[in-house]
Amino acid sequence: MDAASGWCEGCLRTLDEIAAWSTMPDDERRSVLERLAERRVVWQQRPPAAPR
């Protein structure tokens, strides 16, 4: 999980979205998926992470 955004670094969903996914109604899943496209743009524009 990315500490700054709260998004999973792999799928870009939040912990709440990941936890609820299996019981989430289809319309809510579609809404999350639509937001992922916007998040992907933000994610790609973020500054590079500092080496660990």
Image: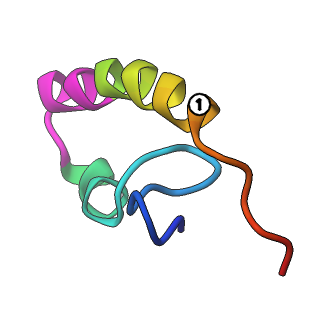
Q: Position of residue 48 (x, y in %)?
A: 73, 50
- Nearest the eye: 48 or 20: 48
Amino acid under disc 1? Gln
Left or right: 7, with 46 as reference point: left
Residue stretch in magenta = 24-32
- Nearest the eye: 37 or 33: 37
Q: Position of residue 32 (x, y in %)?
A: 27, 32
Q: Which of the 4 image quarters holds residue 26?
A: top left
- Asked if residue 27 lies in the magenta stretch, the reply is yes
- Asked if residue 30 lies in the magenta stretch, the reply is yes
Q: Residues within 10 Å of mark 1 (few under 14, many from 20)?
A: few
Vertically, is 13 above or below 52? above
Q: Residue at x 47, y 31 (%)?
A: 42
Q: Residue at x 20, y 51 (%)?
A: 23
Q: Main secondary structure of the magenta part?
A: helix
Toward the bottom, the furthest residue is 52
Q: Which residue is mark 1?
A: 45
- Nearest the eye: 42 or 11: 42
Q: Position of residue 41 (x, y in %)?
A: 51, 22
Left or right: 32, with 10 as reference point: left
Q: Residue at x 61, y 54 (%)?
A: 9
Left or right: 47, with 24 as reference point: right
Q: Which of the 4 image quarters holds residue 37?
A: top left
Q: Residue at x 14, y 35 (%)?
A: 25
Toward the right, the furthest residue is 51
- Nearest the eye: 1 or 17: 1
Left or right: 38, with 16 as reference point: right
What secondary structure is marked by label 1?
helix
